[in-house]
Amino acid sequence: MPNRRKTAGTIFFAVISVILPGWATGQAEGQASAPTHRAATEKITLAQANITGVVSGPNGPEAGVWVIAETSDLPTKFRKIVVTDDLGRFLVPDLPKANYKVWVRGYGLVDSAPIVTPTGKTLPLKAILAPDARTAAQIYPADYWYSLLQVPSASEFPFLKAERSSAPQRGRRENGQASVLTGGIHNQAEWLFAMRTCTQCHQLGDKFTREIEPSLGTFDSTSAAWDRRLKSGQRGPLMATALNQLPHDRALAMLSDWSDRIAAGALPPAPPRPQGVERNVVITEWEWGRGPSDWVHDEMTTDKRNPTVNPYGLVFATSEGAGTLEVENPLTNESSHIDIPTRVDQKEIAPYLMSLEVGFPSPYFGDQVLWTATNSPHNPMMDEKGRVWLTSSIRSKVDPAYCKEGSNNIFAKNDPLDVSIRQLSMYDPETKKWTMIDTCFGTHHLQFAQDKDNTLYFSGEEGAVGWVNTRLYEETHDEQAAQGWCPAYLDSRGDGKFDWKTDNAVAGFPYGLAVNPVDGSAWFAAVGVPGKLVRVDRGSNPPATCRTEVYEPPFESKSIAGNQGFFPHGVDIDSNGIVWTSLAGSGHLASFDRRKCAVRSGPTAAGQQCPEGWTLYHLPGPLLKGTEVGSADYPYYNWIDRFDTFGLGKNIPMATGTNSDSLLVLQPDTGKWVVLRVPYPLGFYSRGLDGRIDDPNAGWKGRGLWSNFSEIPVWHIEGGKSAVSILLHFQLRPDPLAH
């Protein structure tokens, strides 16, 4: 049963009745820019569920600043955030009845003193100018501060490791990042790739990373302080390993120089205030999770194939920190959690990417062990019945005998597997029961195909793509019969045949997964420099008909707009079969059109054979110092709004601005970006998003995007040790005053 944090009363919402004379409200589809001309005397008639008003500063109305309404009166701490229009006016819509703290935050300002008010009020809010540039910069996104980092110049490379000066032959099941960096750091791209190991867990440039914590201790130098902080807490061994991918002393010199220059007064450029449709956004936030040990990885609201599934329903997320399924009821504002079961005692399951001990005390939690769960739930996916399927460990890593060499299983004969880190679990909200399914292959991300078998594909096994025929499993409950896997390999002979003893699997950890709605092929991103998009087609008779194609971002070619691209870390596919990926190393969102490729497979198709298939879009925001492509932002993942769940049209590509407190929406026809900035609390670190249509006839109120704060160190969120993870809902109005 769900463990409810509070008993919730029924929330009765007031009828919304806002009259905007001379302004025609419209549907969420086809949003236009915010209007630039309105009569200054136009009046807003209030409804009891809204808070409205005007933000004014010493120089008059303040346009493009945020108004934040927050309450603790509901079962979960609740917020809504809107942006002022050209005349400084705002309207916070659809607020549950409660008392709210309301204040202003904006670039160039300091936060105004909160005003406590019930709903149904008009507030004259005062914008307070920041006394100096340094004070103003305290609320800038992390990437702006991170852009002050000076990366070693291209002339300093390579940094070779003498003991591994030549790369060994890449093996069958190796760690992708280690394989890329074997022998040292050869160029600036590999340096940036190694630095992204840090941003896979938290932001770089937030207050908690750009400044040295006084509680860390006293040191002879900033370099020594950095060396010590990167050994702290349960994640200390992982941070130290990440540091040692780089030349240790040179990396510490870079980090300490960054911190020292900031301490001496260096400031980043100022980010722009929201403009155009960015001012039409309404952000709703619910706090969930239970503290620093409960970091939430990914949320899920609906069936990716049909976003009208589960309308106005519960939102689910995997808490990798606590080993639970987080649940939010957006109608009653209740948060809860459900324990995720395992088949064995969790003590028999090895922890994933963390230690269960503390070698060097944390400056925040000392010797406390925060994370003890080892079932490591990672990525959820919802089916057409509203059931939640997720990748999690249900046993120790040793595979059943039928997965291994010597088995009669046809997939094991073709490509035997010995271990898997995660397997598969499914939760049915209607029956409140769990089903656990063992898999030979490791699982990480998952996605349903649009076929009669409701095939569920998986990444997570290096050099392979797995699947479960969920229709067959539910009919027979035969785990072995319902699963299969195709090797992802380099077809060096060009004969389409695979021999696991001689052919090389595609190196690089397989991150992300998407199923092409046009031809049913599965795609994943193999991380690395340059990294690869990998297409696996299982054919009509797998494993005999399994085929692989690999496509690297344009790295060697200089003829592509945007020049080098590297380190794909997400993948999604639009309705036309165009593959999109976030190039997390170079800082691009990129599209790949396989139809443009003259060469797709064979001995010459090692990856760089189709630069003409790629289009690269630089992320907005600053670059790191000393680089031409190294964005200070980090697009951890990307997603395609195939069904217009947000209101900007179908097949709109989006990326997570994981280091910039934002979601990034690309308008592919123009190449321009819409930045959905989350101003409060600072530290919006997202690993993904999805979109749901609750009511297709309700305009902007019936649709929206969903995402969540998912930093591993939850205490890096504004609020520090008292912070918890947060669920967010993004909706796009026709204008900043629409109701």
Image (tube, grey):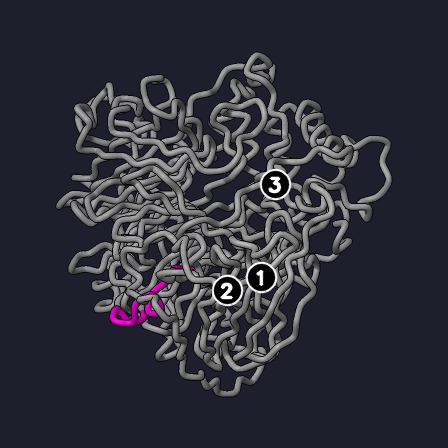
Disc on the earlier residue, 1 or 3? 1
Q: Mark 2 or 3, which is nearer the eye?
A: 2
Could you tell me residue 460's position as x and y percent?
Answer: 40, 46
Q: Residue at x 59, y 40 (%)?
A: 270
Disc on the earlier residue, 1 or 2? 1
> Is residue 43 visible in the rendered structure shown here?
yes
* Amino acid marked by disc 1: Val
What residue would you read off at disc 2?
Answer: 90
Disc on the earlier residue, 2 or 3? 2
Q: Secondary structure at mark 1?
A: strand
**Magenta region:** 694-706
Q: Is residue 264 left or right of residue 431?
A: right
Query: How far apart in space, not on screen, are marks 2 and 3 (Cα)?
Result: 32 Å
What residue would you read off at disc 3?
Answer: 204
Q: Is residue 253 left or right of residue 74?
A: right
Q: Which quarter of the picture shows residue 478?
A: bottom left
> Is residue 374 visible in the rendered structure shown here?
no
* Amino acid marked by disc 2: Phe
Q: Is residue 486 left or right of residue 17?
A: left
What residue would you read off at disc 1?
Answer: 55
